[in-house]
Amino acid sequence: MYSAKCVFSGAAVALLSLFLAQVVIAEEPLEEIIVTADFRERSIAEVPLSITVLDRAMIEQAAVQHFEELIYTLPNVNWSGDGNRARYFQIRGVGELEQYEGAPNPSVGFLIDDIDFSGIGTVATLFDIQQIEVLRGPQGSRYGANALGGLIFVQSVDPTDEWTGMARLTAGQDGTVAGGVAFGGPVSAGSTLRYRLSAHHHQSDGFRNNTYLGRSDTNGRRESTVRGKLLWETENDWSFRLTGMYTDIDDGYDAFAIDNSLTVLSDKPGKDAQASAGVSLKAIWRGSDTISLTSITSVTDSDIDFSFDADWGNPEAWAPFTFDFVTLNDRERKTISQEIRVASTDGAGLFNDAAQWLAGLYLFKLEERLMTVNQGEFFDPFSGFALSLDTRLESRFESLNVALFGQLGFAIGNSGELTVGLRVENRSTDYTDSAGLALGPGETMLGGEIAYSANLAHNMTGYLSLAKGYKAGGFNLGLVPEDRRKFEQEELWNLEAGIKSFWLDGRLLFNAAVFYNERRDQQVRTSLQLVPNDPTSFVFFTDNAAKGKTLGLEADLKWIPDDAWELYANVGILNAEFENFVTAVGDLSGRDQAHAPAYTLALGGVYRHPSGMFARIDVSARDEFFFDVSHDQKSEPFELVNARLGYQTARWTAQIWARNLFNERYAVRGFFFGNEPPDFPNTLFIRQGDPRQIGITFDMRY
């Protein structure tokens, strides 16, 4: 039997051979890709930064249910498997791995239809999603403090001028059953008010077998999403987009085993649940010949339950020792945001229309209440040592971000543009908890960018940019030394150059970017276990490294040689390391940063026969990476192969799919600590990624 690595190598050679082959080019070009997360909606070739855009076809064909399934197709993007679903993302090595307590302070922005879910990306289900945009590097002037490493922007399907709809049914291994329906169009014939509604439910057992409880669903998934959208274009130059969504992620959490297998022994399996409701309203006025006005309002309310059996066992597994611990986190988060911006229109810029301008105001208020409970006991009958734990911490955190931002775009010659952006942001906070800690730090931050782009040829643009991003400082909780109670804000400077091109009458797209960034006062989340035989005695705290630096590149290629074939290849190279960073575990200067693999590769293709038969393969690979900063344990390099085979008509599609076709064993999170009595030796414990799964999906369009 061939190994997954052999399959990856063979598939790479075959697909690259196809890329280099001489074939007949069809007349119809690729559709233009429009980036919606930028200040101005424009072609991806016009935006001077590294971007990957996943269209609806890619989303529906390369994934089954959740955004985490698409991450392996994205260059220099990773995720932390700290829960059942991906909640924390890393772009170019920048991003959180977990959050158990303290103030939310994400490094990677995550928005769904302008609704901010940064740091709580569990809600990223994929039914009826139109496009996903991944913007790499600091978004200093556009998004500010929550986008130090980049931004992930998810856009659901918009209502159309005609009535359309679809229904989907899925069944597969691991007890997978899913179904959804979406429909919409004009409210009435000839109306400019259009709507779209969708609802979807997915459930599966979660790839774990709990032999103690005799259950296969303790890590199961129960995920429901309802979306609604209204578009209205009035006769007086206003347009409105109102979006509402409710997502109920009621997943179990029973993912770790002492032997790092998929057989778990917990007697108190936990939960990784998130119920989120969100609304956004985007209003645009174009009633003037000189300016346009844009207003974006969003509101969210999320209830997040994260709990786990901290000893991963049961009385029988640990006998004759008594070893029983559990941790529960109940988090409620509410946000309100308001952005207002004014922009010049074409023909009404400054300096005889040589410079287009934009200015705006942004407000973001966050309220979070958290209750954390740690309970358990340990008894060693041989030594007589006993430990009992029952602690509870209730905290309240509020923050208010106020930002002023602006951007100028200067025409340089006949084909160049110089863009200058600036953002000034003030963050004030208020924190109190039941332990008597009260803090209220505030600070002002500054970010922006300067970029030059030009047409290098009729089918190629190039750009050079220097951007500064920032992330607010904060404070640590618990038993940390007083000199570690607070940490400073972080700055990230990013120098980047890239090209964006299309060839063969628009049937071949190639984009590439190289970058160097420097992180000053880099915030690093680390941990220590205070009591060797207490798995809940970890102290998580954030510290400032003196400096971090990253050098890397991203490249993506998409080719449609004819009506039958569509091929792609993506590559990311990353060298992200610390400089001058000494911690409690030693000197980490020169060490790679956590969850930052040196390479991320993906390639694949679709073949469509005129009869309606089609086949798809997606192959991805990534290098080893450090699991955390608090230890030197690494993952193993791995390769994944996903495949689909189906039949499509104008009205329906039926397909059989396989994820992780060759059942590759790979890790998405790792901890290194003692969790086995009586000596509690430090051991690497990993959470495995999903094993092979085969299923069928049927779509009906009407």
Image (spheres, grey):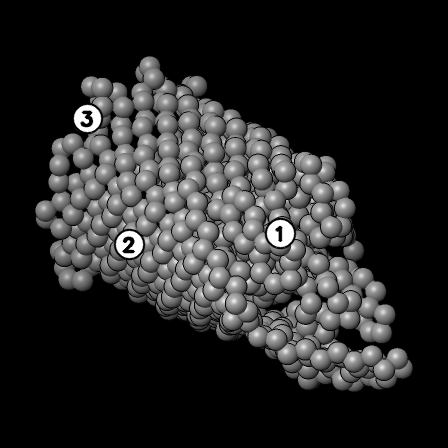
Q: CA distance from mark 2 to mark 3?
A: 29 Å
The image position of residue 495, as x and y in percent, is 52, 28
The answer to which quarter of the image holds residue 682 is: bottom right
* Label 2: element kind: strand
Q: Amino acid at mark 3?
A: Gly
Quadrant of the snapshot with the N terminus: bottom right
Q: Which residue is mark 2?
A: 297
The image position of residue 20, as x and y in percent, is 59, 30
The image position of residue 418, as x and y in percent, is 37, 23
Q: Nearer the viewer, residue 516 or 681?
A: 681
Q: Are marks 1 and 2 in contact (CB under 8 Å)?
A: no
Q: Which residue is mark 3?
A: 347
The disc, 2 or 3, on the residue closer to the chain's N-terminal end is 2
Question: Is residue 176 visible in this depiction of the protein?
Answer: no
Q: Residue at x 18, y 35 (%)?
A: 291
Q: Residue at x 71, y 59 (%)?
A: 528
Up-down relation of residue 586 to residue 228 (above or below): above
Which of discs 2 and 3 lies nearer the camera? The answer is 2
The disc, 1 or 3, on the residue closer to the chain's N-terminal end is 3
* Label 1: element kind: helix
Q: CA distance from mark 1 to mark 2?
A: 37 Å
Q: Amino acid at mark 1?
A: Arg
The image position of residue 431, as x and y in percent, is 46, 61
